[in-house]
Image: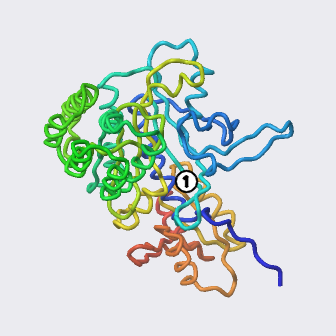
Amino acid sequence: MEQKLHTPEGVRDIYNSECKKKLAVQDKLHQLLHLYGYQDIQTPTFEYFDVFRKEIGTIDSRELYKFFDREGNTLALRPDMTPSIARAVATLFETDRVPLRLCYVGNTFINRTSYQGRLKENTQLGAELIGDDSIEADAEMIAMVVDGMKQIGLSEFQVSIGHVDFLKSLMDETKLSEEIKEELYSLILNRNFFGVDEVLTENHVSKKIRDEFQVLPELMGGVEVLKKASAVATDNKAKKAVARMLKIYKILAFYGVEDHITFDMSMCGNYGYYTGVVFKAYTYGTGDAVVSGGRYDHLIEKFGKQTPSIGFAIIIDELMSALSRQKIAVETEKTNLIVYTDTTLKWAVSLAKEFRLRGKCMELIKREELESKEVYVEYGRQMHAVSLMYLNENRTITMVNLRSGKERVIDVAKRTKTESN
């Protein structure tokens, strides 16, 4: 027997109702970005390796899917949308001076190790605001995230905000090598503050600085955290970071989204290209953030154009997992079935055409001679259809509500005769 092929580890097929729900969520979020004035951009699924090189500040090159073209150039599947868009902006919008609002939907690819148990291909939907370094721009992006989460039915979620400069100031104070700092960043990212203290002690960092690091777990929570953060800020850069976050919060209150906002002064962002405010959205039902974003004022200049920018990416697959586990219904286009025979085919096609012109989704199914109506009712329920029109040879239709199970018979010939009279 020939062995059936299956998907490689870390990728999967998405189909039927699950795929329909995913696309419905994407459409809702995409429409929200359009309402904020963001215009679509599509970049290639793969780029030259240099777009994601180490200096850019994206993932480790070992986690890239790399391959070669006919000329021997090294190419890579995109692990992250932002560097691709940064490259496109520097190339296509070189002379633009006004802020650009761009949005996208696309798949990203990260060759994670198997033990992590995470998908290697993910769908991301996001927005980038190019050419605006204002506090208002920071607030707009965060407000869009909150609005997006609400739009798809989430009520229990939070957007946690941090600032790269706050933690960087602490790191600079240690005078440690970049290699050890990277180790500390990794430990903080994993909330291992015992490990942080151990590394600092081993490298003879003063108790004063070690104590400042140990305060980090306490600098998480509501807006009141910012006052405490300002008191322990090590330099003027850190104090400015805290002051900016407070101003952002005040603008977010204008948007009416402050109830979903928290702060985390230990946050440093997923990527090395972040330069200012960073943020993540969390909800129940998934271990990872469903949204990740931040300011990257120096990324685009690596591609030849100096311009400040901020953006975020919604990880759709993580979001779908959360919606499923929270049992939040996703509204999708309602499918209706028409079951016909050879003799009722013309009638069925005419009915389907009429309903489709009204915007109704109609699926035609030819009835097998020996199959009962119940077989098609069961099929309809499995496909999450809402109704079934069972065309009978005597010009009657048995209408079945697939949600309630109720049936009624419509005599088409009799109704047509009555209408003509």
Quadrant in the picture for the N terminus? bottom right
Q: Is residue 6 above or below residue 172?
A: below
Residue at image coords 31%, 35%: 173
Q: Is residue 349 above or below residue 250?
A: below
Apparent side of residue 82 relative to residue 134 in the rendered image (left or right): right
Q: In x, y percent, where is residue 102?
A: 49, 30
Residue at image coords 60%, 28%: 87
Q: Quadrant of residue 120?
A: bottom right
- Secondary structure at badge 1 equals strand
Q: In x, y percent, where is residue 75?
A: 73, 41
130, 190: nearer the viewer: 190
Q: Quadrant of residue 71?
A: top right
Apparent side of residue 185 relative to residue 43 in the rendered image (left or right): left
Apparent side of residue 379 relative to residue 236 in the rendered image (left or right): right
Label 1 CA crowd tier, 10 Å (few <14, some 14–19, many 20+):
many
Q: Is residue 143 visible?
A: no
Q: In x, y percent, where is residue 382?
A: 52, 75
Q: In x, y percent, where is residue 323?
A: 38, 61
Tag 1: amino acid: Asn
Residue at image coords 19%, 46%: 259
Residue at image coords 79%, 43%: 68
407, 326: nearer the viewer: 326
34, 112: nearer the viewer: 112
Q: Which residue is disc 1 drawn over? A: 122
